[in-house]
Every structure is written in structure tokens, then in C-alpha cells.
Amino acid sequence: MKKNFPIIFILITVSLVGIIYIQTNWILTMVENKEEEFHHKLGDATHDVGMDLISFKESLSSSKPPYLGKPGMNFRPTDQFMKEIMRVPTLAERLSEDQLSSKLKVALNNRGLKDTHFEFCISTESGSSSQLTFNPELKSPNFLKALEDTIHNFSAFCPLLVSSGSDLEGLVPMETLTVVIPGYRDVVMRDVRLKIMGVIFFTLIIISAFYVTVSTLVRQKKLSEIKNDFINNMTHEFKTPLATISLAVDALKNEKVANDRARSDYFSGIIKEENKRMNKQVETILQAALLDRQELQLNLQYIHVNKIIEDALENFQLQLQEKQGRYELQLNAKHDLLRADEVHFTNLISNLIDNAVKYSKDGLVIRIATHNTAKNLVIRIEDNGIGMNKEPQRRIFEKFYRAHTGNVHDVKGFGLGLSYVKTVVNAHHGKIKVESTIGKGTAFTMEFPFKEEV
């Protein structure tokens, strides 16, 4: 697991980065293609309207009767007069704004740009070829403003020229149809927005799956380490009593011991005590399995918490003597009657005291205090032991977790005691928190509500 984890992490990371890179390029390419497609559609629509307008101009020109003058008149018209008399009217003079808007709307719809906002203009160019002036004649209200913004808006142009070689060439005013699409990128994104949202959505799912996978691998790695520690601890816990029993059995086989009633009873007592010790360890493991299946059954009754604490301390007199330790009681809770399971609550207090004894040095001092708040009974169990840093404090209530103290076997146990404590506290609708400082000790504070129907 330790060797494979970095490889798995790197492979998944590279794959995820590759997928995001490809998806990003695909989105950019798709947007570029859509922009190009939009440009073509707008150009085609503008060209369609332009061709229609050119046909309209030619029809106007062909239908205009020539001026022949009055009968009997004898004069020679000037060239300027002839140009003016033959001049074809501009489209702006023949078309209204609504008519041109309708033509453009139909053309845009036919080219797949339905419901697209646009501005338009038909302009004439006058003057010499070196000095052309732009004269808008027929335009929509916001055309000039839209034409100025070349960053957000896109324009298409169509010169409205009559056919080359036509008799009307030179007589028809040079006009240009200009169509502007304000915010054309919004129009482009309108077509691809759902696809982009889909890509982002599924990419986020892949990232989430990656996170869950890595988190699971990290958790499995921690569980593997905890499992190995648990197996090592369990092996050590069972190895010692088994060895003691084996030695006691060998001693009982000795004739001198067998004939000595006192010595036989002594070794028999050792076997019995070690057997009880092993049964206790097995019971602890079975209890953990029971809690894992959430089958903790509470036999609720009213108990005096101060009395439970005093009785539990009596069972630790020998351990305190070995540590040259003592305890201090400040049972200030005047109202200590709590509805709880007496067995589990006693085990809870015993586990916390046992934890203080295990993780301590000589000169141990255990301080146990109780007091009342408006709605709760508060119990605080504090010691001056070895303490712990932030990481163990976050994980101390996890099943099988044990804070390492250099040698994994220097403190006996399976790492189930505090997990059991947390489960019992929760079952009684209580709260528990831990405070600890390296080298100064640890304090557990619990709060239990009064008369809580659990």
C-alpha cells in the first residue's frame, strides 16, 4: 500500500490534468468554430438581404420613364440636367425602417440566427474616390452607438451595386448595407452554453471522484497502519498470559509442586487469573464489535454520579500506588442524580481513569471534579501525565487508534477504551471534549443533560 499509493496518486493526477486540458482545448475550439459559423451566417444573411435590395433598386430604375421634354421645345439639356433627370432614387427614399428590419429578421431566421438582436443602416458614399464620405440615410435608432463598439459587437457589410456593365451603372447611387450584432459573443455562447455547462459538470464529478478516491486511499492507509498496530498489540496482550499459563502448567507437572498443596494452589491461582485476564481482553474485542453494529443496549435507571466515581476509584488503588500517585476529588455537584446505564457509565469512568494511569509517569495526580449547570451535570477528569499533541487529540476517539509513545508495546491495550467512552457518552446524549498539552497532562470534560429520556 505504501509503495503503490504515490504511483496511484500520480497516475490519477496526471489523468485528471490531461482530461481538464483536453476539455479546455475542446471548449475553446468549439467556441472558435461557433464564432466562425456565426460570422458566416451573419454574412450570408446580410448578403441575402443585399441581393434582394439590389433587385429592388434595379426594378425601380427600369420602371422610371425617361424625360422627353415638351412637344415643340427646342433646347439642348445639359449633362448635369440629364444626370439629375436619370438619377435613380436611393433605397432610403423608398424603404422604411420597419420594412428593412423585417427583411433582416427573416434572413437571420432563415440562416439560423433566430431572435438575434441587430442594428442596421443603409449608407451612401459620395465624393471623389480619394475622398469618400459616409452618409447614413436609413438606420436603426442605436446603430451608430453599436458600430463604435468594435470589441463586443460584430459588423457585416454588403455593397448594394448594380450588375457590372448595366446601363444603370454610374447612375445608381453607391450604397452599403451594414448590419451590427451587439454582444455577438453572447449569441455565440447561447448555442454552446449547455455543452460547456455539461463539460464543467462532468469535470467536477471527475474531480470529486478523484478527491473521494484519494481520501479513501489515505483512510485505507491509516486503517492499515491501525490494523497492524492492533494485531501487534493483541499478539502482545495474549502472548504474556499464555506464556505465564504455560509455565504454571509445567510447574504443576513437577512432582514436588504436585505433592505440595500450597504451591499447587498458587500456580492454579496464576492460571485462573491469567485466564480471567485473557477473557477480559476477548470481551473487550467482542464489545467493540457489538458497538460497531450499534447494538449498545442501555438499562436506564437513576444513579448518583458522585458515588459511581468514588467506587470506580477504589478499583485503582494498587495502580496508583505503583505509580506513586494520588487522586483529588472535588465532587461539587449537589444534584448528581442522572438517568443512565449504571454498568456502562461505570465503565466510562473506569476507562478514563485507566487511561490517565496508563499514560502517566511517577508522581501521578488525578483530579476529578463535578459541578452543575442550569441543565447539565459536568464531569472533569484531569491528570498530570505525558499529554499529547494536536493530531492524537483529533483522532483519540477513533476505534483502534492509539497515540504512539515511542514503543508501541509500552502501554497495553487495543485502542478501544476511548472509542467506547465516546459511544457511551453519545448514547446518553452527552458531550465530551479533550484538552491536552505535551508534558503537562490531559483533561476530559463531559456534559450530561438531566432527566434526558434516552
Image (cartoon, grey):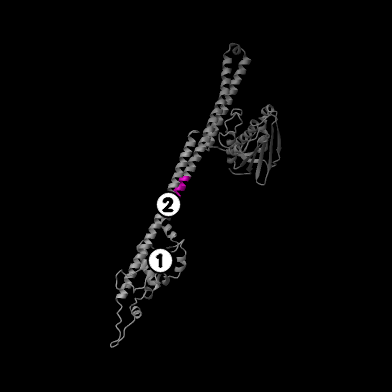
Q: Earlier in the sequence, mark 1 or mark 2?
A: 2
Residue 225 lies left or right of residue 129; in this view the side is right
Q: Which residue is mark 2?
A: 27
Residue 361 lies in magenta, yes or no? Answer: no
Q: Which residues are magenta?
A: 194-207
Give me the residue at 59% from left, 19% from top. Answer: 268
Kind of residue at badge 2: Ile
* Disc 2 residue crowd, few under 14, some 14–19, many 20+, Cα 10 Å: some
- Toward the bottom, the furthest residue is 72
Query: Tag on residue 416?
Result: none
Res. 142 image quadrant: bottom left
Q: Main secondary structure of the magenta part?
A: helix
Kind of residue at badge 1: Val
Q: Report the front residue among 251 and 336.
A: 251
Res. 250 image quadrant: top right
180 is higher (above) or lower (below) than 167: above
Q: Report the front residue among 421 and 409.
A: 409
Give me the residue at 46% from left, 39% from top. Answer: 11
Residue 50 lies left or right of residue 375; in this view the side is left
Q: Given this view, does label 1 or label 2 mark the residue nearer the observer?
A: 1
Q: Which residue is mark 1?
A: 179
- Toward the left, the furthest residue is 71
Residue 204 lies in magenta, yes or no? Answer: yes
361 is higher (above) or lower (below) than 304: above
For label 1, the SS is strand
* Disc 1 residue crowd, few under 14, some 14–19, many 20+, Cα 10 Å: many
Q: Position of residue 149 (x, y in %)?
A: 47, 64
